[in-house]
Image (cartoon, rainbow, N blue to C red):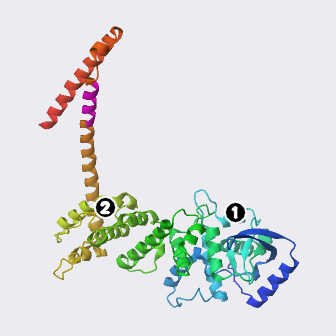
Amino acid sequence: MALKIRVKDIAQREEHINLHIEQSKETVSFHGYQGRSLPLPKIRIASDYLVYRMANFRTQTAQLRWLRENADRTADYFSTGEENASTQQVQHVLLLELSRKGTQSITPIYDVLKKEPIQIEPLLITRTGVIVNGNRRLAAMRQLVADEPSTHQGLAFVECIVLPGTVTARDLEEIEVQLQMARETKLPYSWIDQALAVRKLLADGVPIGRVRELMYLEEDDEVKSIISQLNEAELYLSEYKNEDGGYEQVDSDKQIFIELEKSLKGKEGVQQETRRLIAHVIIGNNQNVLDGRVYNYRLAFGKHHDEVLDALTEKFNLEELDAAADEDDLEIDIDDGSGRDVLAGFRALLKDTSRGPELAKVIAETLDDVIADKTEEKSAKRSLALAQKALNNLAKIDVSKTPSDVVSAVTAVLEQIEKETVRLIGEFEKAKT
C-alpha cells in the first residue's frame, strides 16, 4: 500500500527525543565523531519522530535525476525541504529504491528485513531526529510496516543512538563519509555519489588529508584522482551528451573514467583534447555499437591513441595534427600561430553525436587492426627469439665433456632437432611464395 509520510514539528521531535535520552540507561560507544570515542545514548522511539536527511550523499544523483524529471520544481527543492512532508515523501521513494538494491554478495536491506523483521543495528540520529546513518533502513522498515503490518509492526519503533546537540553540518558530512564510504562499506556508494561527496567536503574546507583519512585512502593523490574522474564525467555529460547533471548515465562507467583520467595525466593541447574527444565517442556509443565492451577500447585514447587519430584523419580527410609530438614537449598549441584553430574540424566531427555510431565503428575497427598487427609483430619477434635461444643452447654443448653413457641420447635429440629444423625451414620457404 502507498505510505504517506508525515513530518512532526521539529520542536516536538526534539522534545520527544530529549525526554527519551533522559530516561535512557544505555549508551553505545561511537568512534565516528571528531576522531574520538564518545558514549552516545541509545533510545527506542516511534519512526514518526524521525526524518530523512536530505543532504544524504547516497541520494545525490537520484535527487538530481528526479529534479530533471520534474522540471517544475526548483533546484533547492531537496536542500530546503527537509521539514516538508512532500519532499520527505519523494526522498522516501528514492531511499526505498536504494534499499531494494544489492550486489552479487550483498542481500538488499529490504529483503533482509522482510524475511526477518528484526533491527540488528541502531540508527544514528541528531537531537532533532534527522537520520545520519540508516536512511535506507528506515525507508525499508516504514514501507514494510505499511505493507505487512501483521508481521512487521515491530519495526514501527526504532532503536537509535543520538549525537550531541553540538554536532554541525560539516560534522555530519564527515560522519557519513567515514561510516558509509570506506572501502569495506556494506553497500558501496555509486562512484559519482562518492566523488560528489569528496568535492563537497573539500569545498567546505575539509583538508585533503582529512578526506583521505575519512575514506581510508593511502595517498592524497587518490583523492585528487577522484575529483579528476568526476570532472571528466561532467565534461562528457555536458559537451557530448548535452545533459548537465545526468550522472546516472555514467554510473556504470567508473573504470573507463579512471582510464581516461590516467591517459590525460601529463598531456596538454592536442594530445589532451583528442584523447578526450575519442573517449567521449567510445563511451557515448558503448551499447549501440560496442555491445557494452567500452573497457576493451580504452587503448584508443591511451596507448594507441596516435594510430586511431591517424586513421580518423585519413578516413574523414581532416587536417593532419601533430599529436604524436615528443611526449616531453607539453607546449603543444591548438593554435598554429595563424590564429586558426587546427582542431576545429576534428572537434566538429567527433562532437557530432549523429555520426557517433559511424565514428565508434571506425575507432573500434582501427584499434582491432592495430592490436592484430602488434600481435603479429610480437609473434614474429618471438619466433626469432626462440630460434636464437635454440642456437645459443646448442653452442653450449661441449662434446669433450659429455659422458659416454649419454652420447647416444644426446645424438638422438640432435637428430630430432635437425629434422625439426629442416621442417621449419621448409615451412618458411612455402610462406615466402
Q: Is residue 291 magenta?
A: no
Is 338 positioned to the left or the right of 26 in the image? left
Disc 2 versus disc 1: distance between alpha carbons?
A: 44 Å
Which of label 2 and label 1 is nearer to you? 2
Q: Residue at x 23, y 36 (%)?
A: 384
Magenta segment, prevailing SS (helix, strand or loop) = helix
Badge 2 element: helix
Q: How many marks?
A: 2
> Horizontal and vertical percent for residue 323?
23, 67
Residue pointed to by mark 2:
300
> Horizontal and vertical percent for residue 343?
23, 75
| Res 377 → quadrant | top left
Crowding around mark 2 (Cα neighbors within 10 Å: few <14, some 14 to 19, many 20+) is many
Magenta residues? 385-393
| Res 310 → quadrant | bottom left
Q: Residue at x 68, y 76 (%)?
A: 132
Q: Which mark is residue 112?
A: 1
First in sequence: mark 2 vs mark 1: 1
> Horizontal and vertical percent for residue 397?
28, 20
